[in-house]
Image (cartoon, rainbow, N blue to C red):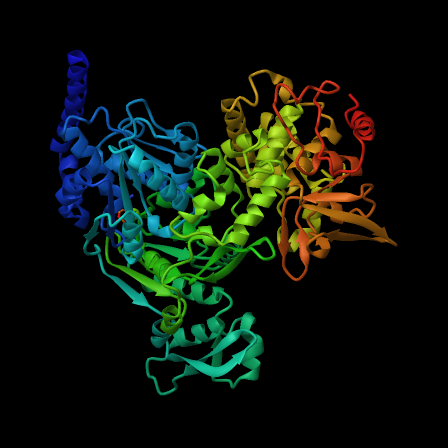
């Protein structure tokens, strides 16, 4: 024992000696000085003391005060000083991949270390950690999956949950789990870090845990609302009494008496009187223009950007948009602009959740003198990250917010006004390293009407994955567990999720996890996609299924630029195969793989209207999925489960059906057209991008689909045609009972147990099965 104590002692000494050497260098001194200047640093002792005395501590403070980068280091340093450095294991969760990576990268710079040694990160697709990593940044999802295999978090000494005020579903779930775990692990410490607004909720949830408030933000941010932006241009904005279809009408009044009216005024006029409002301008008097709260005014953004580029001080600009579509439209508009589209003057970047992390990282790169960085981002840039040369923020005030209509059991994703907390976070992205400016593209009174904070995600999202995880962590009854959450979701939403899980065979009648459910809980994806992988592995046709699931996870690889939509659709039709968008994707991907090997992957994508980024993302996701499947022992290293080159198309169809059920619509041929119906929506249509939209002779009575969207009518985005027998056999809860016993290989594969309610005898099915599995 003495020996091991001694080794521990030496190891932690060695650590602090390395630390000391670097700290003595001028670079280290400068960094330390910077760290000491942060408001959080002044609370260092208070924080360390409080953590050693209390099991749960809440730390709240304004954006930029140093919570994310400093608090984890305080804990690490105090552990090192107390000689426990070698044995401590601190996990800090972040709501997003990009923040887990960029924060860990920042911290190693502050410490003069290398990533993956003392400090590392782990996110879904990648990680940098070693056996000596003591401070690990990860996403909340990664920690939740660790809980699956290590319920007590053995060896972990501290959990820090950052940005808990965001109230993501994983974070709320983790909090509930932690609340139950803490009494069993009295040594474990939990630190919650939050923006100032709702720290108290967490304190009361954890029995009055102490809240440490860190005062002060670092730099002032000059804030403009729409009326302030317009003021300098000789216009004023007033709300009209009139309320029409678009909601409140806003009028722009020209102040003719205003001497400051200049050339800018006319460009604003132009900006606000854009095509979107031409209807208005004609109706209203000449001097009046309108601001429409329902759409983002691209012209106004362009005007502001141009104005900053020409007249503003140096510094990067971050523009918050709602989603990929408007980011791309804006990007295209700006690229055509004489100043903003000039690569010698402007570096135009985008940042969106479905971009790969290496693409996302570009936003942190330094730019040359004289070049201005403009980043068009969604709200993923809202928290945690610091783009250090950023001075200006433009905020459209909206975000695509996921909501969930429990009554109709449909998830929706619509742009809506953000909360005050979000607006503040966005504003806080500037002024992190120097005084900043923030332009809110809406009037102050609209801001005043924002909710204080957003509804927690758990109240506005389908709960299937969450329910599955509750079951697999053995946390008792689903509704019982959720009633102990910080805020409990609607019981109808819970019921819908449980019913869905029963329907697909993940839970049995008594709500116990089935074997299939156990596998699904271990897979980091929606249950329907997980089920496809599980079935693909069992039925030895994993290769195409890996491609399909990866393809459904990334941005649609089939591009459809508006101007040449016809051409793009024709290009996709070339891959059309077996009346299935999913099989078309498999062909496109396999073709790309061959081209890639000949080093002409890019040309192949170009010719076929495919996104090279999506293709690469599919490629790396496939590898990731494979290693997850290996780690849960669904596949081994043998090639047999892949069936790479000569898979049975109908088998693949069956696997797709097993995953996508109950996303089914019936196909009825009428004269020269198709009539498609789903149970919940009635008549539906196919998205024009679907290969099935071009072919009216679908020889199957059913289509299974991954996604439907409601615009005017309901559109199915992608679909695969299936036969009666496939639907009967594979749709619903095929009970994958005991893998070894019941699931005897049948006809070389395995035997299914049908639900008794399906009124077809097993014998008939067996005949059809044989046809299906002709090999
Ligand atoms: P908080 O989590 O309280 O919002 P952070 O710990 O993220 O604050 O950041 C504290 C300060 O550290 C910031 O105000 C900024 O000055 C600096 N900082 C953080 N990340 C970086 C970075 N990547 N590059 C340069 N400075 C950074
Ligand atoms: Mg932070």
Vertical side of 492 occupied by 502: above or below: above
- In this picture, is 678 found above or below 572? below
Name the image quarter holding residue 173. top left
Spot the residue most to the left: 24
Name the residue located 51 percent from the left edge and 57 percent from the top edge: 326
Quadrant for the C terminus in the image: top right
Farthest residue, direction right: 671
Q: Residue furthest front?
A: 510
Q: Nearer the viewer, residue 500 or 231?
A: 500
Front in this rendered view, residue 71 or 728: 728
User: Farthest bottom residue?
Assistant: 257
Q: Quadrant of the N terminus?
A: top left
Residue 591 visible in rendering: yes
Quadrant housing residue 543? top right
From the top left corner, tell me how far across and down residue 742 is, in percent: 66, 22
| Horizontal arrangement in the rendering, residue 544 relative to residue 62 (left or right) | right
Q: How many marks?
A: 0
Instruction: Look at 18% across and 31% down and name the residue there.
Output: 79
The answer to whether 728 is drawn above or below residue 304 in the figure is: above
In the picture, measured across the screen, residue 506 lies left or right of residue 175, that is: right
Image x and y of residue 668, in percent: 82, 50
Can residue 91 be seen?
Answer: no
Residue 406 locus on image (x, y percent): 56, 55
Where residue 138 appears, as percent x and y from the top left, is: 36, 36
Q: Quadrant of residue 232?
A: bottom left
């Amino acid at each position: 024992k003495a020996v091991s104590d001694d080794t521990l002692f030496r190891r932690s000494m060695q650590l602090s000696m390395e630390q000391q050497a670097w700290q003595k260098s001028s670079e280290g001194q400068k960094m330390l000085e910077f760290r000491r200047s942060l408001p959080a640093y002044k609370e260092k002792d208070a924080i360390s003391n409080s953590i050693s005395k209390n099991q749960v501590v809440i730390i709240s403070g304004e954006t930029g005060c140093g919570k994310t980068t400093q608090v984890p280091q305080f804990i690490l340093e105090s552990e090192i000083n107390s000689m426990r450095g070698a044995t401590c294991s601190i996990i800090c969760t972040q709501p997003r991949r990009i923040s887990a990576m960029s924060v860990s990268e920042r911290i190693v710079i502050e410490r003069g270390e290398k990533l993956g040694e003392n400090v590392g990160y782990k996110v879904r697709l990648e990680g940098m950690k070693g056996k000596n990593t003591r401070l690990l940044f990860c996403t909340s999802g990664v920690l939740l999956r660790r809980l699956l295999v290590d319920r007590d978090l053995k060896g972990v000494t501290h959990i820090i949950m950052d940005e808990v005020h965001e109230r993501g579903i994983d974070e709320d779930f983790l909090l509930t789990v932690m609340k139950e775990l803490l009494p069993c692990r009295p040594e474990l410490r939990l630190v919650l870090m939050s923006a100032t607004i709702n720290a108290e909720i967490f304190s009361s949830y954890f029995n009055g845990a102490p809240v440490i408030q860190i005062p002060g933000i670092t730099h002032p941010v000059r804030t403009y609302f729409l009326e302030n932006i317009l003021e300098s241009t000789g216009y004023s904005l007033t709300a009209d009494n009139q309320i029409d279809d678009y909601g409140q009408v806003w009028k722009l009044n020209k102040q003719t008496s205003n001497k400051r009216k200049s050339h800018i005024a006319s460009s604003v006029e132009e900006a606000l009187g854009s095509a979107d409002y031409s209807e208005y301008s004609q109706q209203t008097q000449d001097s009046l223009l309108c601001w429409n709260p329902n759409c983002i005014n691209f012209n106004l953004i362009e005007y502001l950007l141009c104005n900053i580029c020409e007249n503003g001080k140096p510094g990067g600009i971050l523009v918050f948009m709602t989603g990929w579509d408007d980011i791309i439209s804006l990007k295209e508009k700006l690229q055509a602009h004489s100043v903003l589209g000039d690569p010698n003057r402007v570096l135009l970047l985008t940042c969106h959740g479905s971009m790969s992390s290496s693409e996302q990282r570009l936003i942190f790169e330094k730019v040359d003198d004289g070049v201005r960085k403009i980043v068009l981002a969604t709200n993923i840039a809202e928290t945690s990250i610091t783009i250090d040369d950023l001075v200006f923020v433009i905020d459209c005030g909206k975000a695509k917010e996921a909501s969930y209509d429990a009554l109709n059991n449909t998830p929706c994703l619509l742009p809506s006004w953000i909360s005050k907390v979000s607006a503040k976070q966005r504003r806080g992205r500037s002024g992190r390293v120097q005084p900043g400016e923030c332009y809110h593209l809406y009037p102050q009174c609209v801001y005043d009407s924002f909710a204080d904070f957003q509804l927690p995600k758990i109240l506005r999202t389908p709960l299937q994955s969450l329910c599955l995880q509750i079951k697999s962590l053995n946390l008792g009854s689903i509704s019982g567990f959720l009633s102990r959450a910080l805020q409990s979701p609607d019981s109808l939403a819970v019921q819908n999720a449980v019913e869905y899980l029963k329907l697909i065979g993940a839970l049995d009648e008594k709500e116990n996890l089935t074997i299939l459910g156990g596998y699904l809980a271990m897979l980091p994806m929606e249950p329907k996609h997980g089920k496809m992988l599980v079935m693909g592995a069992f039925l030895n046709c994993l290769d195409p299924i890996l491609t399909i699931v990866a393809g459904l996870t990334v941005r649609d690889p089939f591009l459809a630029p508006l101007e040449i939509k016809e051409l793009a659709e024709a290009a996709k039709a070339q891959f059309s195969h077996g009346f299935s968008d999913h099989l078309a994707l498999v062909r496109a991907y396999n073709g790309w793989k061959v081209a890639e090997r000949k080093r002409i992957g890019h040309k192949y994508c170009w010719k076929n209207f495919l996104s090279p980024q999506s293709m690469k993302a599919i490629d790396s996701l496939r590898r990731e999925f494979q290693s997850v499947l290996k780690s849960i022992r669904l596949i081994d290293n043998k090639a047999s489960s892949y069936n790479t080159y000569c898979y049975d198309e109908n088998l693949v169809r069956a696997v797709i059906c097993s995953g996508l059920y109950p996303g089914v619509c019936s196909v009825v041929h009428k004269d020269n057209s198709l009539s498609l119906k789903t149970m919940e929506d009635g008549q539906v249509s196919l998205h024009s991008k679907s290969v099935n939209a071009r072919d009216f002779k679908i020889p199957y009575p059913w289509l299974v689909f991954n996604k439907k969207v409601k615009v005017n009518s309901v559109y199915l985005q992608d679909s695969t045609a299936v036969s009666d027998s496939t639907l009967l056999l594979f749709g619903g809860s095929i009970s994958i009972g005991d893998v070894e016993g019941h699931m005897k290989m049948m006809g070389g594969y395995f035997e299914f147990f049908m639900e008794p309610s399906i009124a077809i005898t097993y014998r008939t099915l067996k005949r059809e099965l044989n046809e299906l599995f002709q090999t």
